[in-house]
Image (cartoon, helix red, strand yellow):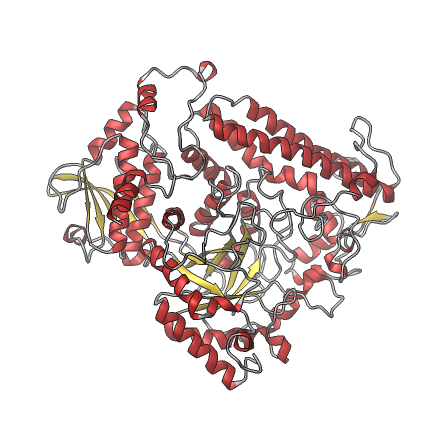
Amino acid sequence: MNELRHDRDRRCAGPGGAAPLLTLLGLLLVLLPVPAAGDRAPVPDEPGEDGYELWLRYRLVEDATLRAHYRTRLAEVVVAGETPTAAAVRRELRCGLRGLLGETVPEAGAVSRDGALVVGTPAASPLIAGLGLDLDALGPEGYRLLDTTVDGRRLLVVAAATEVGTLYGTFHLLRLLQLHRHLDGLDVAAAPRVRHRVLNHWDNLDRTVERGYAGFSLWDWHKLPDYLDPRYTDYARANASLGINGTVLTNVNANALVLTPMYLEKAAALAGVFRPYGLRVYLTARFSAPIEIGGLATADPLDPAVRAWWRDKVAEIYRYIPDFGGFLVKANSEGQPGPQDYGRSHADGANMLAEALAPYDGIVMWRAFVYAADKPEDRVKQAYNEFVPLDGQFRDNVLVQVKNGPLDFQPREPFHPLFGAMPRTPLMMEFQITKEYLGFATHLVYLAPMWTEVLTADTYARGPGSTVARVVDGTLHGYTRTGIAGVANTGTDRNWTGSHFDQANWYAFGRLAWDHTLSPDTLAGEWIRLTFTHDPAFVRPVKQMMLGSREAAVNYMTPLGLAHLMGPGHHYGPAPWYDDAPRADWTAVYYHRADTLGIGFDRTATGSNAVSQYFPPLDSIYGHLDTVPEKFLLWFHHVPWDHRMASGRTLWDELVHRYTAGVEAVRAMRATWRQLEGLIDARRYEQVAAFLRIQEKEARWWRDACVSYFQTFSRRPIPAGLEPPAHPLDHYRALRFPHAPGI
């Protein structure tokens, strides 16, 4: 064990992870003059540039002046405390500073020289206590970074009310160093805007991952609890560096076995690895568990024996995991059991679990992704109809977890009308980081613009300025418990996420969960510099690629408010013709409703009236053709093919132009990437280049298949100057993908 710890201190990464220190060859190269961007020789491959280190690469600061500045301001390190979290802070600083500065920074038990870095809490450090900082105002996870002078010595301070706060502050400081920021005059006070910042893993006990595109599950249940893969620590480090403080280990399509002693022991082992990094473990609760593993005849949430079973089970879990976070529940949705099986409400089911968790400060995250099997009503209305009447009936440790849109993680949806409509119930945002409907791992689609589009949307629940973000962070309705979840995109692939650019979505989610006011532009720039290089010849064009990538995907998949055109089951590729499913709202034709008159789903007062679920003036804006934003046109309206668009084109011509624009945007990304060869290591460059080739091929497939199909209804020609589909429609309809990943 000591040998393993020493190796981790040297490398900062898990098994086979690359050393953050430069090889001798790399060190010699950085000492040579750096040519202008256009004259650079190719960057040499480093053994570990496989993406494993994520944004925590800690490469040597090449600018000698800046490196000297850091060495002056970080002459020694003093970390107060002897807890596992304090030890994690020491390890990260030791590894990070050695990599960034090219030398080991001395550690000391107390300040002995000018330029010391002091990390700690007032309880552990008399020096920090003496500064008189109002750390309690920053909450249990907030921190202060401060350039100050104490007894004539110039110091840098990372101070927090708790050690977890000092850990988050340490990662912030290391990020500033990685981004080459000056430290003089540093004064940062930071605290999370949302309390529970959670990854939802859709991981199964057999290590398959539903909607996972990066290999198998990180959790090797068979070897747990006796073997703890060092990768678990690296996972915790990565999340702590972003401020993510919770992880749901198992799929929302739950397996009751995870609540049995065998698996609780395994989950407890993971919790022990995660605990020093402020990462709490949550589990999914299968509602029928009292029957399946408890031997009861019912799972009725009002049955006293069922309630007692859950109280006993929760007490057992906390004996294994004292800081257990609570349950995530998918109930009465897509065949999952739930309280409605017994004539009870979602509030009845959630409150039963919340009651059992309340003595331990645990929470229930009850998903609002529900749609009844026996109701033909517009599917996007059903969650609102089921949950709004229950507002105020949930216990205070229940958060209703709501997807960003009312359908299902589509490339673009309007925000979910539940946001703002339940003022007495905390609503927790659910984003999807894994790209189930956005090209899996091979399409470059940066999701921060999508998430920001939703968070900044105005619900008008209490007049202008009632944004979705203010619902989620609790400031609109005064929620004291707040949360945001992201469906994880991690797996056993060496680069964690299946592609290098999908790491950016994990990074952006964590940073936005901490502070939703951060811009996609800022986050993209940070991630590129942390992950690849500071060279502006690379950073500028790649950032533009990222910022335009989501809109490109919307255009080549589902432009103008179309939705759910993906292949059935696997959701890979286009299948707008799909109409053969056990229920209509699992088909594509249910959503686009194309016919010879036009296309789109009428959700106005003359149709399903889904617009009525939005507050004024949105109901009117969305409900009229002359005011609805074109990006939501076909979501809310069935529109004639000859309808005149803002561009002056007919709807049909505009639709084909949008599909074409999506393909052309991917072609432009490929052309941009080709110009960047040699500015980063060849290994990562070549994988991205290969994936962009796949993306262009599949964008063209999406465009041609959809245009061919919709043309059978519009009966209009392809607009002049645009390419016709490469194949007849029958070619696209005949394609089959029996082993597409993530099912």
Left or right: residue 226 compared with residue 712 = left
Indicate the position of residue 133 as horizontal and vertical percent values.
Answer: 23, 53
Of 50 and 220, the residue lying toward us: 220
Left or right: residue 557 compared with residue 144 = right
Of 566 and 556, the residue lying toward us: 566
Q: Residue 220 appears in which quarter of the rendering?
A: bottom left
| Image height of 712 relative to 70, above or below | below
At 53% across and 60% down in the image, what residue appears? 251
At 51% across and 22% down in the image, what residue appears? 677
At 30% across and 33% down in the image, what residue appears? 100
The mark tally for this picture is 0
Indicate the position of residue 418 as horizontal and vertical percent values.
Answer: 60, 62
Of 108 and 608, the residue lying toward us: 108
Indicate the position of residue 473 as horizontal and vertical percent values.
Answer: 46, 58
Outermost residue toward the bottom in this view: 304
Q: Residue 13 appears in which quarter of the rendering?
A: top left
| Image height of 589 relative to 369, above or below | above
Left or right: residue 137 compared with residue 304 = left
Indicate the position of residue 621 as horizontal and vertical percent values.
Answer: 69, 53
Q: Residue 713 appears in which quarter of the rendering?
A: top right
| Image height of 94 relative to 632, above or below | above
Q: Is residue 278 in view?
A: no
Q: Is residue 270 in view?
A: yes
At 79% across and 31% down in the image, what residue appears? 726
